[in-house]
Image (cartoon, rainbow, N blue to C red):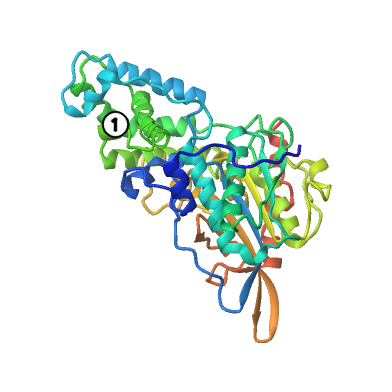
Amino acid sequence: MLRKGALALALSSELVAAAINNTTPSLGFNQTLEQTWAQYSPYYPAAEYTAPPDGCSIIQVNLLQRHGARYPKKSDGKAMKKSAEQLQGASSFNGSEYDFLANFTYDLGTDDLVPYGAAQSYDAGQLHYTRYASLVSENMMPFLRASDSERVVESALNWTAGFAYASNQQYAPVLSVIIDQSTNDTLDDNMCPNVGTSDDETTDWADVFAPAIADRINAAAPGASLSNSDIVNLMMLCPFETVANEAPSPFCDLFTLDEFNSYEYYGDLTDYYGNGYGQELGPVQGVGYVNELLARLTGQPVQDETQTNHTLDSSPTTFPMNLTFYADFSHDNQMISIYSALGLFAQPHNLDPTQPDTERTWQVYKMVPFSGRLITEKLSCTADGETGEYVRILVNDAVQPMDFCGDTGNGLCTLDNFVESQQYARLNGEGDWALCTD
């Protein structure tokens, strides 16, 4: 499916001004609290971007980006509305932080990108043009694909608008391919009906952290009779109302920072056991994208028997080779599967659903915040008179260690070693793909 477009979602005047200056406005919180919102955290760079080592130059970049901030999914919205109304039904309230409930009405939309999310993608387009301008020319434009979800498509189009603005309209990329999510799609986790869920693990953790919060709020709001799931729903209202209204939600004031730290771990468990290493069929859903990435890095045809669309990937129109800039737009769950297929953020043991590991690297606010991004850079490096090709991966600007392919200590692996390290993808998930439908 081919489509062209311009800015997909109108931005408020404040957001336009901020986006043009590449400074999406603060939502009114310190970053510490926003980062406890797990997969609903606003984008922020997990580290300061570092240029490649001396003697190295970037010759290709592959961007994979999550859509920007959105309204909640229908099921989450229904659950949050119900829990908010249950709290409103208390016979009385002890504390001024509950005063807003007298006039509160749940009014969030469903699924769609919010203006703040549009600005995030616009910012990213500016940033990526500025960073990788040397790879772009009239004859070598970024090639864009998006999974066919409205919020993902709009994010891609807003990215192109930001990219064009940063280049003074000299380079205006187009969205060339929109992949139907009802068919083979490497940018959405829709093809593994036998995949399990993280419900058991997240319920176990809610049973640990939520009762004390429920007891506190129920004491302050007699008659509310909030359950553990109600607590999770009310905490979820904090990020969703904040990104939708571009102002702190009053629901955020009902909980302490320590309590939100527990909510963050709830999100970590959700993705770890939903699409990550803790889910038997999680990593295999990222195999198709990894094999497409290997094809782009090596200039060889895609070799994959999982969720790739062979019609699209075999055509130079819909899967061109030997370009310098590729940009794909996707969802957080699919990105988690891709990280896991690649071998990023590997844990020494599965996350404990009753006790957070404070040393874990699996923290989804660093991995898939709204507008989060994975960037794979292909580099040409010269040392001692010899030139070779290397790969470096960044997640939200943080260079990722890649011990699995002989990381030399600066995030670089030789291209050959990186390709060799991806045996799980190259072998089509080593039998896991068949388990998706057997």
Q: In the current view of this chain or complex, which residue is farthest to the bottom? A: 384
Q: Position of residue 281 (x, y in %)?
A: 62, 39
Q: In which quarter of the view is residue 8 placed?
A: top right
**Front residue of 96 and 12:** 12
Q: Quadrant of the N terminus?
A: top right
Give the structural element (helix, strand or loop) at label 1: helix
Q: Residue at x 65, y 51 (%)?
A: 327
Residue 323 lies in quadrant:
bottom right
* Residue 220 place in picture, x, y as percent: 18, 23
Residue 351 visible in the snapshot: no
* Picture quadrant where residue 205 is located: top left
Image quarter in which the C terminus is found: top right
Answer left or right for 107 relative to 133. left
Is 316 drawn above or below residue 1 in the view shown? below
Query: What is the x, y in percent for residue 27?
Result: 36, 43
Residue 71 seen: yes
Q: Where 12 sits versus 404, above or below?
A: above
Q: Does residue 436 appear left or right of residue 277 in this picture?
A: right
Number of other residues with Cα within 10 Å of mark 1, as a class: few under 14, some 14 to 19, many 20 or more: some
Residue at 62 percent across and 43 percent down: it is 157
* Residue 87 shown left or right of residue 147 in the figure: left
What amino acid is found at the position of numbered circle 1 in the picture? Pro
Count of picture labels: 1
Residue 360 is situated, as x and y percent measured from the top left of the image, at: 42, 52
Outermost residue toward the left? 94
Q: In the rendered image, which residue does mark 1 sit on? A: 250
Closest to the observer: 255 or 250?
250
